[in-house]
Image (spheres, rainbow, N blue to C red):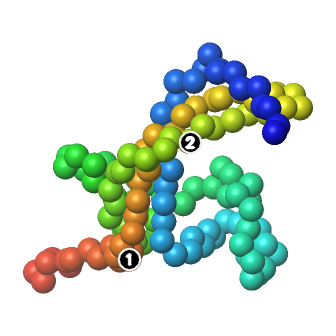
Amino acid sequence: MVQIGITQSPFCTNDLCIIELQGSLILRDIDPALAKLKQKLPAEHFADKYFGDIHYLQEKGKCILIAGHHTLSGEEKVLKKPFAVLKRIDAGKYQVTSIVRRKLVFSKRPQPIIIEVEKGSK
């Protein structure tokens, strides 16, 4: 059995949540050589990439993700088992930087954003 030392960071005040999407996410500003690959890319290629805005609705637990010209309806769920976000300090020593207790689930198909124009206006 391997023992791992874990300490809590004094900066452990971030409230993070997981974003769960069904399907594929295609980003326009990713390296074209990587985009041509037919395999899944590691998470580091998506670091600091913008893919949309999340807006919370007045109805508790409901949210909308606006990605490009599409909207996705989602809901907030509490994780059955929380995740710890760890930062490696030394060999066998990690520091807990945050605890993830919630996730936003977008399980429905994206809907196009349509703007209706009145017939009398130009």
Residue 72, position as x, y percentages in the image: 37, 67
Residue 25, position as x, y percentages in the image: 57, 70
- Can residue 91 be seen here? The reply is yes
Q: Against 36, is 26 above or below?
A: above
Residue 57, position as x, y percentages in the image: 25, 50
Residue in the image at 52% along x and 75% along y: 23
What's under tag 1, amino acid-wise? Arg
In front of the other: 108 or 6: 6
**Where on the picture, by quarter, is residue 10?**
top right
**Where on the picture, by quarter, is residue 98?**
top right
Q: Residue furthest front?
A: 1
From the image, tell me which residue sits under label 1.
109
Q: Is residue 71 left or right of residue 116?
A: right
Q: Against 95, is 49 above or below?
A: below
The residue tagged with tag 1: helix, strand or loop?
Answer: loop
* Quadrant containing the N terminus in the rendered view: top right
Count residues near mark 1 (Cα–Cα under 10 Å), then give few for <14, some for 14-19, many for 20+: few
Q: Against 9, is 99 above or below?
A: below
Residue in the image at 22% along x and 46% along y: 60
Checking the image for residue 84, the label placed there is none
Residue in the image at 71% along x and 26% along y: 6
Q: CA distance from mark 2 to mark 1?
A: 27 Å
The residue tagged with tag 2: helix, strand or loop?
Answer: strand
From the image, tell me which residue sits under label 2.
83
Q: Residue furthest right?
A: 91
